[in-house]
Amino acid sequence: MDITRRWGITLPLPGLSLPDQRELITALPILGYTDAWSAELNGVDAFTPLVLASQWAPELRLGTAIAGIYTRAPVALAVSAATLGSLAPGRFVMGIGTSSQVVVEQWNGIPFEKPFQRSRDMLQFLRAALAGEKVNQRFETFAVHGFRLDPAPAVPPALALAALRPGMLKLAAKEADAAITNWLSPADVPQVREAAGPDCELIARVFVCPTTDTEMARTIGRRVLAAYLTVPVYAAFHEWLGRGELLAPMLAAWAKGDRKGALAAIPDAVVDDLVIHGSLAACRERVAEYQACGLDTPVISLLPAPGAETTQSLRKLAPA
């Protein structure tokens, strides 16, 4: 994949219905954005915003970040990837990942088992299926017999894997074309890059709260951080990055059901490391720090602050 001077944005854009985003998405390439990556949790699905963007801004590279490999069956993922691959030939990246225990087990009642093996199996299946091959194979975590895409996309989509720690990062480098990560600081990038190796595109969602009100930004940041960093996969990620001791009081309070105490226990320094805030010019410079530290593709995710307007934010956060 061409990773020269990439600068991404997260879809859907906050505060706007999908139909109302057309004008802004159409303007993204003019502003200098090269990529649009979807975010999927408990609202809009990973594919619909990209289908719209493929028609509204045909210059953008599009990617799912991520589509879940437990909550979607192998063939369902292949069919969705082929559809978007056909709408955006050579411009779509199928990003997949395990998601988290909360989404998989608590929300969907599916056992969160063998995440490494299922990720490997899904990448191998998708690689074959999207190339138009007939798949007739029993993988370690699932089996597919006699399936072929009809039609397969003329240009098979690239593949990316959500990866937080060395095992998954190395798997992404071996079986995918890119690794997707998030909730890291610029100073964390070299450690992640070392695990992924020099030849794997490294993509990260970076969270931007565009306000000069530091306390407001930290309040917003703490709410989002607590929701993520208390999830086991993210807690383990930050233990590996060296924040285990800093985050231990938050995790202890959360485990006791003390939500307010958990928020208060997140140090200011951690919030400032992981959530970009300040003037829009300062935020843009901070995003650029990630690239200077070895990140290939920063994908901005806006955390709306009171008074922050999405259109202005997009324009001011565009690459200089």
Image: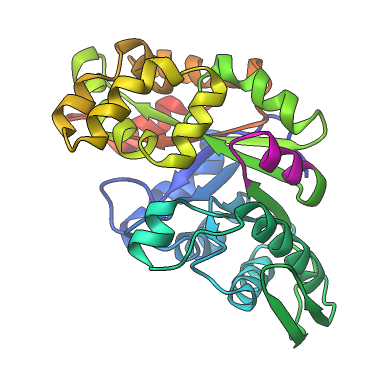
What residue lies at 36% left-to-right and 35% top-to-bottom? 302
Residue 76, how many percent across, how many down?
58, 76
Q: Is 1 positioned to the left or the right of 286 in the image?
A: right
Please report the residue visible at 57 percent of the width from the left and 14 percent of the height from the top. Answer: 187
Magenta span main SS: helix
How far across and how far down the image is residue 280, in percent? 37, 19
Task: Give the left or right position of residue 89, taking residue 80 as reference.
Answer: right
Q: Quadrant of residue 232?
A: top left
Q: Is residue 4 above or below residue 158?
A: above
The answer to which quarter of the image holds residue 14 is top left
Q: Which residues are magenta?
A: 162-173
Residue at 63% across, 76% down: 79
Residue 170 on the magenta segment? yes
Residue 66 location in percent, x, y?
A: 53, 53
Q: Quadrant of residue 249?
A: top left
Tell me, yes or no, if residue 304 can be seen here: no
Count of labels shown?
A: 0
Is residue 187 on the magenta stretch?
no
Q: Quadrant of the N terminus?
A: top right
> x%, y% of residue 198?
81, 28
